[in-house]
Amino acid sequence: MLLLKNGTFIDWQTLEFRQTDLLVEEGVNGVIKFIEPLTASSSSHVSGENPSPEIMKEIDCTGKFITKSFANGHHHAYSALARGMHAPKKSPANFAEILQYVWWPLDKALNYEIIRYSALVTAMACAKSGVTFVIDHHASPFAVAGSLEIIAKAFASVGISHLLCYEISDRDGADIARQGLDETAAYLLNYQGLVGLHASFTVGDDTLKRAVEIAASANSGIHMHVAEDLCDQELCLQAHGMRVAERLDKAGVLQFPKSILAHCLHLDDQERSLVGASPAWVVENMESNLNNSVGIFNSKGFGKNVMLGTDGMHSDLLRSAKAAFFAGHSSDAIDYPGAHQRFRNVHHYLAGNEFSGDGENNLVVLDYDTPTPFGEANFYGHFLFGLDSRHISHVISGGRLIVENGQILTVDEDEILSEARRQARILWARMH
Protein backbone atom coordinates (compact mmCIF):
# COMPACT_ATOMS: atom_id res chain seq x y z
CA MET A 1 0.00 0.00 0.00
CA LEU A 2 0.95 3.64 -0.50
CA LEU A 3 0.34 6.37 2.05
CA LEU A 4 0.02 9.88 0.63
CA LYS A 5 0.59 12.29 3.51
CA ASN A 6 -0.60 15.86 4.02
CA GLY A 7 -2.10 16.37 0.56
CA THR A 8 -5.18 18.14 -0.75
CA PHE A 9 -7.48 15.68 -2.49
CA ILE A 10 -9.67 16.97 -5.34
CA ASP A 11 -12.71 14.81 -6.07
CA TRP A 12 -12.80 14.55 -9.88
CA GLN A 13 -16.62 14.51 -9.97
CA THR A 14 -17.72 16.93 -7.23
CA LEU A 15 -14.53 19.06 -7.28
CA GLU A 16 -14.59 19.04 -3.47
CA PHE A 17 -11.18 19.93 -1.96
CA ARG A 18 -10.22 17.91 1.11
CA GLN A 19 -7.03 18.10 3.14
CA THR A 20 -6.21 14.53 4.11
CA ASP A 21 -3.84 11.62 4.23
CA LEU A 22 -4.73 8.97 1.68
CA LEU A 23 -4.18 5.22 1.83
CA VAL A 24 -4.00 3.62 -1.63
CA GLU A 25 -4.57 -0.10 -2.09
CA GLU A 26 -2.89 -1.94 -4.93
CA GLY A 27 -4.72 -4.01 -7.53
CA VAL A 28 -7.28 -3.65 -10.29
CA ASN A 29 -10.10 -3.36 -7.76
CA GLY A 30 -8.07 -1.45 -5.17
CA VAL A 31 -9.62 1.48 -3.36
CA ILE A 32 -8.49 4.64 -1.63
CA LYS A 33 -9.22 5.42 2.01
CA PHE A 34 -9.17 8.80 3.67
CA ILE A 35 -7.28 8.98 6.95
CA GLU A 36 -8.67 11.16 9.71
CA PRO A 37 -6.38 13.92 10.98
CA LEU A 38 -4.07 13.28 13.90
CA THR A 39 -5.24 14.41 17.32
CA ALA A 40 -3.13 15.14 20.39
CA SER A 41 -4.21 11.94 22.11
CA SER A 42 -4.48 9.43 19.29
CA SER A 43 -2.82 8.10 16.19
CA SER A 44 -4.25 8.63 12.75
CA HIS A 45 -6.64 5.95 11.63
CA VAL A 46 -8.42 4.81 8.49
CA SER A 47 -12.22 4.77 8.59
CA GLY A 48 -12.10 4.02 12.32
CA GLU A 49 -9.44 1.31 11.99
CA ASN A 50 -5.72 1.23 12.69
CA PRO A 51 -3.45 1.94 9.74
CA SER A 52 -2.51 -1.12 7.75
CA PRO A 53 0.86 -2.66 8.63
CA GLU A 54 1.25 -3.37 4.89
CA ILE A 55 2.10 0.24 4.02
CA MET A 56 5.17 -0.06 1.82
CA LYS A 57 5.88 3.58 1.03
CA GLU A 58 4.93 7.01 2.32
CA ILE A 59 4.96 10.07 0.08
CA ASP A 60 4.90 13.56 1.54
CA CYS A 61 2.32 15.57 -0.43
CA THR A 62 2.55 18.77 1.60
CA GLY A 63 1.48 21.65 -0.62
CA LYS A 64 0.47 19.27 -3.39
CA PHE A 65 -2.88 18.25 -4.90
CA ILE A 66 -4.07 14.68 -5.45
CA THR A 67 -6.77 13.68 -7.91
CA LYS A 68 -7.82 10.88 -10.24
CA SER A 69 -5.40 10.25 -13.08
CA PHE A 70 -6.40 10.75 -16.70
CA ALA A 71 -7.48 8.55 -19.61
CA ASN A 72 -7.20 8.89 -23.39
CA GLY A 73 -10.29 8.15 -25.47
CA HIS A 74 -8.53 7.71 -28.85
CA HIS A 75 -4.82 7.21 -29.44
CA HIS A 76 -2.54 5.77 -32.16
CA ALA A 77 0.57 4.31 -30.53
CA TYR A 78 1.78 3.06 -33.92
CA SER A 79 2.58 6.67 -34.91
CA ALA A 80 4.95 7.29 -31.98
CA LEU A 81 8.13 7.10 -34.07
CA ALA A 82 6.89 9.48 -36.78
CA ARG A 83 8.15 12.57 -35.00
CA GLY A 84 10.79 14.32 -37.12
CA MET A 85 10.68 11.84 -40.00
CA HIS A 86 11.47 12.84 -43.57
CA ALA A 87 8.93 14.65 -45.72
CA PRO A 88 6.69 12.47 -47.91
CA LYS A 89 7.59 11.96 -51.56
CA LYS A 90 4.71 14.26 -52.49
CA SER A 91 3.41 17.16 -50.45
CA PRO A 92 -0.19 16.21 -49.55
CA ALA A 93 -2.82 18.50 -51.01
CA ASN A 94 -5.73 17.16 -48.96
CA PHE A 95 -6.62 14.66 -46.23
CA ALA A 96 -6.82 11.71 -48.61
CA GLU A 97 -3.25 12.41 -49.72
CA ILE A 98 -2.09 12.77 -46.08
CA LEU A 99 -3.24 9.19 -45.61
CA GLN A 100 -1.81 8.06 -48.95
CA TYR A 101 1.62 9.64 -48.59
CA VAL A 102 2.20 9.73 -44.82
CA TRP A 103 0.22 7.36 -42.61
CA TRP A 104 -0.43 4.41 -44.90
CA PRO A 105 3.24 4.11 -45.93
CA LEU A 106 4.15 4.27 -42.23
CA ASP A 107 1.74 1.58 -41.06
CA LYS A 108 2.86 -0.71 -43.93
CA ALA A 109 6.48 -0.33 -42.78
CA LEU A 110 5.83 -1.43 -39.20
CA ASN A 111 7.30 -4.70 -37.98
CA TYR A 112 6.84 -6.32 -34.59
CA GLU A 113 9.88 -4.75 -32.94
CA ILE A 114 8.92 -1.27 -34.16
CA ILE A 115 5.39 -1.86 -32.87
CA ARG A 116 6.77 -2.82 -29.47
CA TYR A 117 8.94 0.27 -29.13
CA SER A 118 6.19 2.53 -30.44
CA ALA A 119 3.94 1.17 -27.68
CA LEU A 120 6.63 1.53 -24.99
CA VAL A 121 7.36 5.12 -25.99
CA THR A 122 3.64 5.92 -26.00
CA ALA A 123 3.08 4.30 -22.62
CA MET A 124 5.95 6.23 -21.05
CA ALA A 125 4.69 9.52 -22.50
CA CYS A 126 1.22 8.75 -21.17
CA ALA A 127 2.52 7.93 -17.70
CA LYS A 128 4.53 11.14 -17.45
CA SER A 129 1.44 13.07 -18.59
CA GLY A 130 -0.72 11.52 -15.88
CA VAL A 131 -2.57 9.18 -18.26
CA THR A 132 -3.01 5.68 -16.81
CA PHE A 133 -5.60 4.31 -19.27
CA VAL A 134 -5.37 4.38 -23.07
CA ILE A 135 -7.96 3.46 -25.68
CA ASP A 136 -5.78 2.74 -28.70
CA HIS A 137 -6.48 2.17 -32.40
CA HIS A 138 -3.69 0.18 -34.10
CA ALA A 139 -2.76 -0.53 -37.74
CA SER A 140 0.13 -2.62 -39.14
CA PRO A 141 -1.11 -4.39 -42.30
CA PHE A 142 2.10 -6.39 -42.84
CA ALA A 143 2.43 -7.36 -39.16
CA VAL A 144 -1.12 -8.14 -38.07
CA ALA A 145 -1.19 -11.43 -36.16
CA GLY A 146 -0.20 -10.95 -32.52
CA SER A 147 0.31 -7.19 -32.83
CA LEU A 148 -2.30 -6.31 -30.21
CA GLU A 149 -0.75 -8.56 -27.57
CA ILE A 150 2.64 -6.92 -28.18
CA ILE A 151 1.06 -3.53 -27.46
CA ALA A 152 -0.82 -4.87 -24.44
CA LYS A 153 2.36 -6.28 -22.88
CA ALA A 154 4.31 -3.09 -23.58
CA PHE A 155 1.63 -0.94 -21.97
CA ALA A 156 1.39 -3.28 -18.99
CA SER A 157 5.16 -3.21 -18.45
CA VAL A 158 4.99 0.56 -17.94
CA GLY A 159 1.82 0.32 -15.86
CA ILE A 160 -0.74 1.62 -18.35
CA SER A 161 -4.18 -0.02 -18.57
CA HIS A 162 -5.66 -0.28 -22.03
CA LEU A 163 -8.52 -0.99 -24.39
CA LEU A 164 -7.04 -1.96 -27.75
CA CYS A 165 -8.30 -2.72 -31.24
CA TYR A 166 -6.86 -3.47 -34.66
CA GLU A 167 -7.81 -1.10 -37.49
CA ILE A 168 -9.52 -3.47 -39.95
CA SER A 169 -9.70 -2.15 -43.51
CA ASP A 170 -10.15 -3.37 -47.08
CA ARG A 171 -7.67 -0.82 -48.42
CA ASP A 172 -4.85 -3.40 -48.55
CA GLY A 173 -6.92 -6.25 -49.94
CA ALA A 174 -9.23 -8.98 -48.73
CA ASP A 175 -6.52 -11.14 -47.19
CA ILE A 176 -5.21 -8.41 -44.88
CA ALA A 177 -8.78 -7.47 -43.97
CA ARG A 178 -9.36 -11.10 -43.00
CA GLN A 179 -6.16 -11.10 -40.94
CA GLY A 180 -7.45 -8.04 -39.08
CA LEU A 181 -10.75 -9.77 -38.33
CA ASP A 182 -8.92 -12.89 -37.15
CA GLU A 183 -6.51 -10.92 -34.97
CA THR A 184 -9.44 -9.11 -33.38
CA ALA A 185 -11.41 -12.27 -32.65
CA ALA A 186 -8.35 -13.99 -31.18
CA TYR A 187 -7.38 -11.02 -29.03
CA LEU A 188 -10.89 -10.63 -27.58
CA LEU A 189 -10.77 -14.20 -26.30
CA ASN A 190 -8.13 -13.19 -23.73
CA TYR A 191 -8.29 -9.41 -23.33
CA GLN A 192 -10.86 -6.66 -23.00
CA GLY A 193 -10.91 -4.72 -26.24
CA LEU A 194 -12.90 -3.34 -29.14
CA VAL A 195 -13.38 -4.17 -32.81
CA GLY A 196 -11.48 -1.60 -34.83
CA LEU A 197 -12.35 -0.33 -38.29
CA HIS A 198 -10.53 2.36 -40.24
CA ALA A 199 -13.34 4.43 -41.79
CA SER A 200 -16.41 3.81 -43.89
CA PHE A 201 -14.67 4.66 -47.17
CA THR A 202 -12.09 1.86 -46.77
CA VAL A 203 -14.43 -0.77 -45.32
CA GLY A 204 -16.65 -2.87 -47.58
CA ASP A 205 -20.03 -4.28 -46.64
CA ASP A 206 -18.79 -7.82 -45.96
CA THR A 207 -16.01 -6.61 -43.67
CA LEU A 208 -18.36 -4.26 -41.87
CA LYS A 209 -20.89 -7.02 -41.37
CA ARG A 210 -18.27 -9.42 -39.99
CA ALA A 211 -16.87 -6.76 -37.64
CA VAL A 212 -20.32 -6.11 -36.19
CA GLU A 213 -20.83 -9.85 -35.74
CA ILE A 214 -17.55 -10.16 -33.82
CA ALA A 215 -18.47 -7.19 -31.63
CA ALA A 216 -21.86 -8.71 -30.83
CA SER A 217 -20.48 -12.17 -30.05
CA ALA A 218 -17.69 -10.76 -27.83
CA ASN A 219 -19.94 -8.24 -26.04
CA SER A 220 -17.75 -5.48 -27.39
CA GLY A 221 -18.21 -2.47 -29.66
CA ILE A 222 -16.82 -0.83 -32.80
CA HIS A 223 -14.03 1.76 -32.64
CA MET A 224 -13.64 3.64 -35.94
CA HIS A 225 -13.05 6.97 -37.65
CA VAL A 226 -16.28 8.63 -38.75
CA ALA A 227 -16.54 11.51 -41.24
CA GLU A 228 -13.14 12.88 -40.31
CA ASP A 229 -12.95 14.39 -43.77
CA LEU A 230 -15.65 15.19 -46.31
CA CYS A 231 -14.23 12.49 -48.60
CA ASP A 232 -15.65 9.86 -46.22
CA GLN A 233 -19.16 11.17 -46.90
CA GLU A 234 -18.64 11.63 -50.64
CA LEU A 235 -17.33 8.10 -51.16
CA CYS A 236 -20.01 6.60 -48.92
CA LEU A 237 -22.72 8.25 -51.00
CA GLN A 238 -21.10 7.04 -54.22
CA ALA A 239 -20.61 3.45 -53.08
CA HIS A 240 -23.62 2.90 -50.81
CA GLY A 241 -26.18 5.57 -51.67
CA MET A 242 -26.34 6.81 -48.08
CA ARG A 243 -24.39 8.94 -45.63
CA VAL A 244 -21.84 7.51 -43.20
CA ALA A 245 -23.85 7.58 -39.97
CA GLU A 246 -26.87 6.10 -41.76
CA ARG A 247 -24.71 3.26 -43.08
CA LEU A 248 -23.27 2.57 -39.63
CA ASP A 249 -26.72 2.65 -38.07
CA LYS A 250 -28.10 0.17 -40.60
CA ALA A 251 -25.08 -2.11 -40.05
CA GLY A 252 -25.59 -2.14 -36.27
CA VAL A 253 -22.51 -0.15 -35.23
CA LEU A 254 -24.55 2.36 -33.24
CA GLN A 255 -26.35 -0.27 -31.19
CA PHE A 256 -23.35 -0.91 -28.94
CA PRO A 257 -22.79 1.28 -25.84
CA LYS A 258 -19.09 0.36 -26.20
CA SER A 259 -18.82 1.79 -29.74
CA ILE A 260 -16.51 4.78 -30.17
CA LEU A 261 -16.88 7.10 -33.16
CA ALA A 262 -13.77 9.22 -33.66
CA HIS A 263 -13.96 12.74 -35.11
CA CYS A 264 -17.56 12.98 -36.47
CA LEU A 265 -16.88 16.33 -38.12
CA HIS A 266 -18.87 16.11 -41.35
CA LEU A 267 -22.23 14.79 -40.16
CA ASP A 268 -25.48 16.52 -41.06
CA ASP A 269 -28.27 17.17 -38.57
CA GLN A 270 -30.03 13.88 -39.29
CA GLU A 271 -26.82 11.92 -38.72
CA ARG A 272 -26.13 13.81 -35.52
CA SER A 273 -29.58 12.87 -34.30
CA LEU A 274 -28.89 9.21 -35.11
CA VAL A 275 -25.64 9.28 -33.17
CA GLY A 276 -27.07 11.32 -30.31
CA ALA A 277 -30.01 8.96 -29.86
CA SER A 278 -27.71 5.93 -29.75
CA PRO A 279 -25.66 4.66 -26.79
CA ALA A 280 -22.42 5.05 -28.79
CA TRP A 281 -19.72 7.55 -27.79
CA VAL A 282 -18.06 10.30 -29.83
CA VAL A 283 -14.41 11.19 -29.26
CA GLU A 284 -13.10 14.65 -30.13
CA ASN A 285 -9.51 15.08 -31.39
CA MET A 286 -9.22 18.82 -31.88
CA GLU A 287 -5.47 19.20 -32.44
CA SER A 288 -5.36 16.44 -35.04
CA ASN A 289 -8.28 18.01 -36.87
CA LEU A 290 -6.54 21.37 -36.87
CA ASN A 291 -3.27 19.82 -38.06
CA ASN A 292 -5.00 18.02 -40.94
CA SER A 293 -7.20 21.02 -41.84
CA VAL A 294 -10.29 18.81 -41.95
CA GLY A 295 -12.59 21.02 -39.89
CA ILE A 296 -13.47 22.05 -36.34
CA PHE A 297 -15.36 19.72 -34.02
CA ASN A 298 -18.95 20.66 -33.14
CA SER A 299 -20.82 18.66 -30.49
CA LYS A 300 -24.26 19.68 -31.76
CA GLY A 301 -26.75 16.83 -31.42
CA PHE A 302 -24.37 14.37 -29.75
CA GLY A 303 -25.64 14.77 -26.20
CA LYS A 304 -23.38 14.04 -23.24
CA ASN A 305 -21.47 11.09 -24.71
CA VAL A 306 -18.47 13.10 -25.90
CA MET A 307 -14.94 12.47 -24.66
CA LEU A 308 -11.43 13.56 -25.63
CA GLY A 309 -8.59 11.82 -27.45
CA THR A 310 -5.26 12.79 -28.94
CA ASP A 311 -5.36 10.77 -32.21
CA GLY A 312 -1.65 9.99 -31.93
CA MET A 313 -0.59 13.65 -31.95
CA HIS A 314 0.78 13.35 -28.40
CA SER A 315 -0.24 11.79 -25.07
CA ASP A 316 -1.10 14.89 -23.01
CA LEU A 317 -4.82 15.08 -22.19
CA LEU A 318 -4.51 18.35 -20.28
CA ARG A 319 -3.20 19.91 -23.48
CA SER A 320 -6.08 18.39 -25.49
CA ALA A 321 -8.67 19.80 -23.10
CA LYS A 322 -7.29 23.29 -23.59
CA ALA A 323 -7.29 22.88 -27.37
CA ALA A 324 -10.91 21.68 -27.33
CA PHE A 325 -11.92 24.70 -25.29
CA PHE A 326 -9.98 27.40 -27.14
CA ALA A 327 -10.60 26.16 -30.69
CA GLY A 328 -14.22 25.39 -29.87
CA HIS A 329 -15.07 29.02 -29.12
CA SER A 330 -15.96 29.76 -32.72
CA SER A 331 -17.83 26.59 -33.64
CA ASP A 332 -18.96 24.66 -30.60
CA ALA A 333 -21.11 25.11 -27.52
CA ILE A 334 -18.33 24.46 -25.00
CA ASP A 335 -17.91 26.27 -21.70
CA TYR A 336 -15.62 25.85 -18.69
CA PRO A 337 -17.56 22.96 -17.08
CA GLY A 338 -18.13 21.39 -20.50
CA ALA A 339 -14.41 21.26 -21.27
CA HIS A 340 -13.73 19.50 -17.98
CA GLN A 341 -16.68 17.16 -18.51
CA ARG A 342 -15.31 16.02 -21.88
CA PHE A 343 -11.88 15.61 -20.30
CA ARG A 344 -13.33 13.29 -17.65
CA ASN A 345 -16.06 11.57 -19.69
CA VAL A 346 -13.78 8.69 -20.67
CA HIS A 347 -14.02 7.48 -17.06
CA HIS A 348 -17.81 7.31 -17.41
CA TYR A 349 -17.44 5.40 -20.68
CA LEU A 350 -15.11 2.87 -19.05
CA ALA A 351 -17.10 2.45 -15.84
CA GLY A 352 -20.47 2.32 -17.59
CA ASN A 353 -19.23 -0.49 -19.80
CA GLU A 354 -17.54 -2.31 -16.90
CA PHE A 355 -14.02 -2.18 -18.32
CA SER A 356 -11.31 -2.79 -15.72
CA GLY A 357 -8.19 -0.75 -15.06
CA ASP A 358 -9.59 2.71 -14.34
CA GLY A 359 -10.42 2.35 -10.66
CA GLU A 360 -10.23 4.98 -7.96
CA ASN A 361 -6.67 3.93 -7.06
CA ASN A 362 -5.40 5.59 -10.25
CA LEU A 363 -4.10 8.96 -9.09
CA VAL A 364 -1.85 11.87 -9.95
CA VAL A 365 -0.03 14.11 -7.51
CA LEU A 366 0.20 17.67 -8.78
CA ASP A 367 2.97 19.99 -7.63
CA TYR A 368 0.99 23.01 -8.74
CA ASP A 369 2.78 26.22 -7.84
CA THR A 370 -0.26 28.47 -8.17
CA PRO A 371 0.27 32.20 -7.53
CA THR A 372 -3.45 32.66 -6.79
CA PRO A 373 -6.01 30.97 -4.53
CA PHE A 374 -7.16 27.56 -5.81
CA GLY A 375 -10.34 25.84 -4.70
CA GLU A 376 -13.65 24.38 -5.75
CA ALA A 377 -15.12 27.80 -6.61
CA ASN A 378 -12.45 28.60 -9.22
CA PHE A 379 -11.28 25.12 -10.21
CA TYR A 380 -12.19 25.49 -13.90
CA GLY A 381 -10.12 28.63 -14.28
CA HIS A 382 -7.06 26.81 -12.97
CA PHE A 383 -7.84 23.69 -15.03
CA LEU A 384 -7.89 25.63 -18.30
CA PHE A 385 -5.35 28.39 -17.63
CA GLY A 386 -2.96 26.96 -15.05
CA LEU A 387 -2.62 23.21 -14.72
CA ASP A 388 -0.46 21.39 -17.26
CA SER A 389 1.64 18.26 -17.43
CA ARG A 390 4.75 19.91 -15.97
CA HIS A 391 2.93 19.94 -12.63
CA ILE A 392 2.65 16.14 -12.50
CA SER A 393 5.14 14.83 -9.95
CA HIS A 394 3.81 11.36 -9.08
CA VAL A 395 1.53 8.95 -10.94
CA ILE A 396 -0.16 5.93 -9.38
CA SER A 397 -1.71 3.22 -11.57
CA GLY A 398 -3.72 0.44 -9.99
CA GLY A 399 -2.36 1.51 -6.62
CA ARG A 400 1.25 1.15 -7.82
CA LEU A 401 3.63 4.09 -8.05
CA ILE A 402 4.81 4.23 -11.67
CA VAL A 403 6.14 7.82 -11.80
CA GLU A 404 8.00 9.46 -8.91
CA ASN A 405 9.20 13.05 -9.10
CA GLY A 406 8.69 12.95 -12.86
CA GLN A 407 10.74 9.78 -13.38
CA ILE A 408 9.40 6.44 -14.67
CA LEU A 409 9.93 3.67 -12.12
CA THR A 410 8.70 0.61 -14.00
CA VAL A 411 11.02 0.48 -17.01
CA ASP A 412 14.40 1.87 -18.04
CA GLU A 413 13.36 5.01 -19.88
CA ASP A 414 16.82 5.91 -21.20
CA GLU A 415 17.38 2.44 -22.61
CA ILE A 416 13.97 2.37 -24.30
CA LEU A 417 14.41 5.83 -25.83
CA SER A 418 17.85 4.88 -27.13
CA GLU A 419 16.50 1.76 -28.83
CA ALA A 420 13.41 3.66 -30.04
CA ARG A 421 15.68 6.08 -31.90
CA ARG A 422 17.33 3.11 -33.60
CA GLN A 423 13.96 1.61 -34.48
CA ALA A 424 12.80 4.97 -35.84
CA ARG A 425 15.69 5.02 -38.31
CA ILE A 426 14.75 1.49 -39.39
CA LEU A 427 11.12 2.52 -39.81
CA TRP A 428 11.98 5.58 -41.88
CA ALA A 429 14.26 3.51 -44.14
CA ARG A 430 11.54 0.87 -44.61
CA MET A 431 9.09 3.58 -45.66
CA HIS A 432 11.30 4.16 -48.70
Image (tube, rainbow, N blue to C red):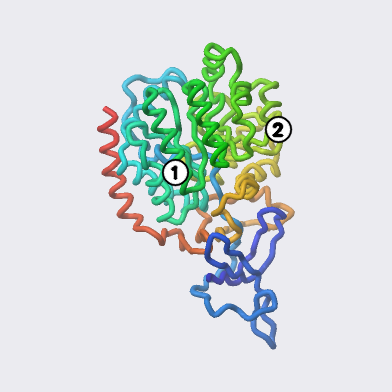
Question: Which residue in the protein does label 1 denote?
Answer: 187
At which x and y percent is residue 171? 41, 23
Question: Which residue in the protein does label 2 denote?
Answer: 333
Q: Is residue 265 visible?
A: no
Q: Residue at x 42, y 33 (%)?
A: 180
The three-letter code of the residue at mark 2 reads Ala
Question: Number of marks in the image?
Answer: 2
Q: Residue at x 60, y 61 (%)?
A: 66
Residues 317 and 50: in front is 50
At which x and y percent is residue 231? 52, 17
Q: Quadrant of the C terminus?
A: top left
Residues 345 and 19: in front is 345
Q: Is residue 322 left or right of residue 196?
A: right
Q: Is residue 339 visible?
A: yes
* Above or below: residue 15 compared with residue 165: below
Mark 1 neighbour density, 10 Å: few (under 14) some (14–19) many (20 or more): many
The three-letter code of the residue at mark 1 reads Tyr
Q: Residue at x 60, y 47 (%)?
A: 350
At which x and y percent is residue 283? 59, 36
Residue farthest along the front direction in this orientation: 217
Label 1 vs label 2, nearer the camera? 1
Residue 426, picture quadrant: top left
Q: Tag 2's secondary structure?
A: loop
Q: Tag 1's secondary structure?
A: helix
Q: Could you tell me if the residues under marks 1 and 2 are in contact, i.e. CB atoms within 8 Å? A: no
Q: Residue at x 39, y 40 (%)?
A: 80
Mark 2 neighbour density, 10 Å: few (under 14) some (14–19) many (20 or more): few
Residue farthest along the right direction in this orientation: 377
* Image mark for residue 270: none
Residue 108, picture quadrant: top left
